[in-house]
Image (cartoon, helix red, strand yellow):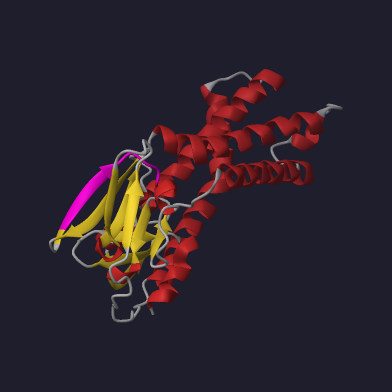
Amino acid sequence: MLKNIFDIFVQPYPQRERTNTQALIHSLGEGVFLYLFFVLFEPFDISEWNDPNKYFKLLGFSFVTSASTYFHRQILPSIFPKFHEEKNWVIWKEIVGVLFLLLIITTGNVAYGSAIFKWGFTLSNWLTFFSWVVGIGIFPTVFWVLSDYIYQLKKYSQPIVIQEIKDNQADEKLKLIAENEKDYIELKNKDLLYIESADNYSTIYFLKAEKTEKLLLRSSLTRLESQIEDKNIVRTHRSFIANLDHVIKVSGNAQGYKLHLNHTDMLVPVARKFSFLIEKLR
């Protein structure tokens, strides 16, 4: 029983894909929410403050919170990319990530309070503020993460029957050119399996004499995508392009759909925003 409970925390969990603009909007929204919460309910003895600039000074806590959440969403993943890889992202990492965010928010707000209100940056003050932050955030966080996991698991684990693969690509050829305009690969559309990006490089997986081969090109995935005209060779994820004509099965977990392709054991992920592609396979 206990083992089954702990097993839940190592299950795959989706990471939210956000652009810098989306992350900024979400973070500002959370800061505004905190400010309104402080103004409307005046918790933590705020109602006893006798300061004509009270509401202006409360904006500082809002700013610190927005900056902390943006740092957590966008900056940390770029500093520790391996830890934040979606294929290795599980429930316990999501929960620990949120707790770390609460720690950042606490530290930032105690530092702000010490500078503006002369609280004193002491361990006692930090622990007091951290208990407030955790008291407000921890239980809704755990409940939300587990509830969202169950919802996503049910949504993406439904069996999907796909159409029999048809060779729609005949002998059309595809040429993918690297950024230096010198290195390239030319192959038949039907021989391309998938392309995976890694930083400024892309690895192309393809068939040659019925065997799977790969070639590394210095090029972004977006640049290679612009060179592809075949409607069945499509972007499925921020890091993947897949040839839908090679899909033999679709599976899924809480992170989303996975494409099983001919001639490879690699499961190509399908990001939520590309879930509509699954309809092409039914």
* Residue at x 67%, y 18% (from the top left corner): 115
Q: Nearer the viewer, residue 256 or 56?
A: 256
Kindly tell me whether residue 118 is visible in this rendering: no
Instruction: State left or right for residue 120 relative to residue 1.
Output: right
Q: Which of 178 and 53 is in front in this view?
A: 178
Residue 18 percent coordinates (x, y): 53, 48
Residue 5 percent coordinates (x, y): 32, 60
Q: Give the range drawn in magenta.
A: 212-220
Residue 55 percent coordinates (x, y): 80, 34
Instruction: State left or right for residue 71 relative to residue 256.
Output: right
* Residue at x 32%, y 38% (from the top left corner): 182
Q: Is residue 136 magenta?
A: no
Give the number of callouts. 0
Q: In which quarter of the image is residue 107?
A: top right
* Residue at x 44%, y 48% (from the top left corner): 222
- The image shows residue 247, relative to residue 57, as above or below, that is below
Q: Which of 207 and 186 is in front in this view?
A: 186
* Residue at x 29%, y 72% (from the top left corner): 170
Q: Where is the N terminus found, in terms of image quarters?
A: bottom left
Residue 106 percent coordinates (x, y): 56, 33
Kindly tell me whether residue 25 is visible in this rendering: yes
Q: Where is the C terminus found, in terms of image quarters?
A: bottom left
Q: Residue lying farthest right? A: 52
Secondary structure predominantly adopted by residues drawn in magenta: strand
